[in-house]
Image (cartoon, grey):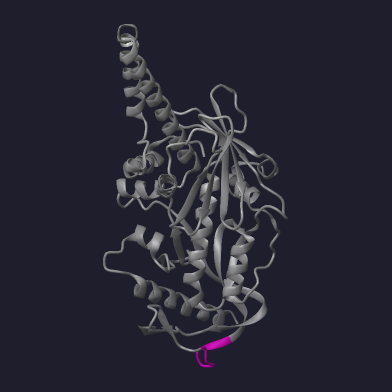
């Protein structure tokens, strides 16, 4: 029995390796394969280390890899294993991929005949290093894809599970599950306070901690990898609001934000309008691991913030950090306020040049200093602003 199971694992590894070669392009490097490769970046089994598939790198990790070539920054990965199952499955005992590709660009597979497969009380698994938070919808999507249920799941608030996962063993589980307020420090910016609204099982997004994903055919792996990428992108954004600092000793100049689950893979960030009396809100819809759609909502009676949706989306996609996005919005608001004060002073100066000349000069000097340290405050400058946010994601000392 063990020999047959090991034979099945060998055939799977050969198919996955062949698949990675078929999907690989001439100019593909490790980072490209991890983020965009259909099968991720595959590392073959060596000795007692099982084959693993690396499928996600954060913007910070990508930049670190670019600045230190060959450093091999470790991204998010799963291990390819085989294990016993309570149900009998038909597993391949010989490689199934043929040399040609199907018309859709995917590998062509041989049918699971009696000569190429065998009924075994075993199953292939993609195993996580530690239990991974997945939404109920992602779990259902994978189960529909593989035709195999994932056992041992305990549903809970997805946001609560992300908090628990982020701190791992460094944070007590009961505290991670019950605490909801976290203080995040950013350079050149007031401290942020994030309240993680975990919702309820009826109104919020539910999920479970998944240890391993069962499957029986190698053709399932690319689709599973893409679902995992989507999930880790969502988890990364929620996790960027977390900090081990749950007690704020200095309450001065504190900005408050509430992160709440919305429908599907979207969430909202609510905050006090920087220049108004009402609440403002940014809704982030994580469409995939590579595409996010953001929209800013404000009270029509409040001053319009000079941050278009495209600008906010670009910053979030570049840095994958909610605090950096909020920092960019508030910096634009500060720039708007200073520019407005300068314009008012110029009007007054024209009316009373002798009285206000000295004040105008001082204000212009102050405005220039603040504006020079801020991001661009219009959609015309969004490309440069997004690039700055991407670099800040790597060099800022953020407590997450």
Residue 369 vertical position relative to residue 225 in the rendered view, above or below = above
> Along the line of sight, which residue is nearer the eye, 267 or 39?
267
Residue 207 vertical position relative to residue 336 in the rendered view, above or below = below
User: Residue most toward the left?
Assistant: 26
Q: Main secondary structure of the magenta part?
A: loop
Image spot of residue 313 (x, y percent): 44, 48
Left or right of residue 376: residue 120? right
User: Residue most toward the front?
Assistant: 351
> Along the line of sight, which residue is nearer the eye, 125 or 148?
148
Residue 268 vertical position relative to residue 181 in the rendered view, above or below = below
Q: Is residue 170 visible?
A: yes
Q: Quadrant of the N terminus?
A: bottom right
Residue at (63, 47) in percent of width and height:
164
> Along the line of sight, which residue is nearer the eye, 233 or 326?
326
Image spot of residue 81 (x, y percent): 53, 70
Q: Please provide the residue range marked out in magenta.
A: 112-118
Residue at (36, 39) in percent of width and height:
378
Residue at (36, 25) in percent of width and height:
370
Q: Is residue 68 visible?
A: no
> Along the line of sight, which residue is nearer the eye, 285 or 233?
285
């Amino acid at each position: 029995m063990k020999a047959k199971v090991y034979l099945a694992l060998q055939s799977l590894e050969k198919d996955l390796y062949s698949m990675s070669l078929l999907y690989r392009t001439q100019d593909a490097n490790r980072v490209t394969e991890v983020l965009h490769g259909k099968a991720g970046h595959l590392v073959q089994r060596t000795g007692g280390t099982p084959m693993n598939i690396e499928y996600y790198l954060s913007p910070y990790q990508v930049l670190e890899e670019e600045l230190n070539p060959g450093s091999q920054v470790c991204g998010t990965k799963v291990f390819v294993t085989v294990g016993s199952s309570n149900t009998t499955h038909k597993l391949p005992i010989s490689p199934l991929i043929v040399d040609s590709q199907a018309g859709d660009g995917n590998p062509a597979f041989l049918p699971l005949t009696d000569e190429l497969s065998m009924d075994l009380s075993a199953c292939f698994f993609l195993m996580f290093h530690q239990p991974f938070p997945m939404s109920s919808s992602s779990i259902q999507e994978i189960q529909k894809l593989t035709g195999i249920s994932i056992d041992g799941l305990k549903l809970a608030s997805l946001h609560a599970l992300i908090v628990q996962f982020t701190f791992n063993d460094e944070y007590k589980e009961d505290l991670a599950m019950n605490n909801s307020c976290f203080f995040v420090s950013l350079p050149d910016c007031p401290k942020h306070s994030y309240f993680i609204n975990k919702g309820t099982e009826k109104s919020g997004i539910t999920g479970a901690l998944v240890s391993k994903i069962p499957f029986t055919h190698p053709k399932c792996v690319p689709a599973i990898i893409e679902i995992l990428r989507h999930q880790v992108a969502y988890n990364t954004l929620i996790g960027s609001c977390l900090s081990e600092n749950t007690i704020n000793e200095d309450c001065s100049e504190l900005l408050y934000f509430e992160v709440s689950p919305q429908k599907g893979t979207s969430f909202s960030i609510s905050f006090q309008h920087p220049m108004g009396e009402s609440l403002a809100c940014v809704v982030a819809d994580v469409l995939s691991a590579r595409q996010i759609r953001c929209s800013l909502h404000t009270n029509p009676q409040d001053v319009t913030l000079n941050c278009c949706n495209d600008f906010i989306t670009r910053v979030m996609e570049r840095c994958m950090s909610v605090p950096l996005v909020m920092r960019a919005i508030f910096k634009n608001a500060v720039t708007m306020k200073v520019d407005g004060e300068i314009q008012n002073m110029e009007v007054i100066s024209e009316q009373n040049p002798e009285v206000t000349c000295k004040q105008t000069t001082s204000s212009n000097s102050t405005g220039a200093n603040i504006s020079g340290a801020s991001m661009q405050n219009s959609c015309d400058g969004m490309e440069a602003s997004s690039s700055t946010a991407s670099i800040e994601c790597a060099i800022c000392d953020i407590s997450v």
